[in-house]
Amino acid sequence: MEGVEEQWRQELFQPGSMDTVQSVYACCGLNSAEDYIRIARAPPASCCKESNCINPLNLYLTGCLPKVEEAFADEATVTAYHQYGLLAFGCLILLLTILLAIHYQNRKRRFSY
């Protein structure tokens, strides 16, 4: 999240620094579109749902910080599910290996009589 905050700090001195973040995450400003009003600047085109930024209803209302946090939280959840899936798969393979070893041990014992 520090990356988004750093981008916003750059936006204060270099207009357009937040454009990529705003376009990718469909957001506007750090916390909301009002961030641009606070710095006495009109929201850029990357804050708009359509190319028509004149209509305030076309602005993305959600700020980029909450959107990026939400995206990373979703990714963390998916990663956790993948890890649990891999753990379950590993346990299944271990169980099958043990059963196979027992089977061969019993088979070896039967044929040695």
Image (cartoon, grey):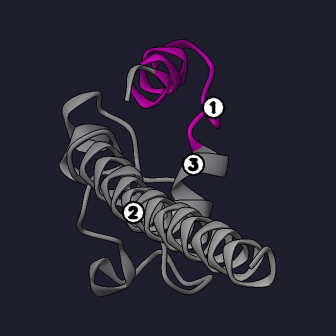
Q: Quadrant of residue 57?
A: bottom left
Q: Amino acid at mark 3?
A: Val
Residue nearest the viewer, comparing 52 with 109:
109
Q: Which of label 3 and label 2 is nearer to you?
A: 2
Residue bearing the label numbered 2: 84
Q: Which of label 3 and label 1 is nearer to you?
A: 3
Question: Which quadrant: the C terminus?
Answer: bottom right
Q: Earlier in the sequence, mark 1 or mark 2?
A: 1
Q: Residues within 10 Å of mark 2 (few under 14, many from 20)?
A: few
Q: Cα distance, mark 3 to mark 2?
A: 31 Å
Residue nearest the viewer, comparing 44 with 83:
83
Q: Give the side of residue 56 with respect to residue 7, left or right.
A: left
Q: Secondary structure at mark 3?
A: helix
Q: Amino acid at mark 2?
A: Tyr
Q: Cα distance, mark 1 to mark 2?
A: 38 Å
Q: Residues within 10 Å of mark 1 (few under 14, many from 20)?
A: some
| Residue at screen point 24% across, 63% down | 62
Q: Secondary structure at mark 1?
A: loop
Q: Is 88 above or below relative to 37?
A: below
Q: Is residue 6 magenta?
A: yes
Residue bearing the label numbered 1: 17
Q: Earlier in the sequence, mark 3 or mark 2?
A: 3
| Residue at screen point 30% across, 42% down | 65
Q: Cα distance, mark 3 to mark 1?
A: 8 Å
Q: Secondary structure at mark 2?
A: helix
Q: Is residue 9 magenta?
A: yes
Q: Give the side of residue 80 with respect to residue 57, left or right.
A: right
Q: Amino acid at mark 1?
A: Ser
Tell me which segment is drawn in magenta: 3-18
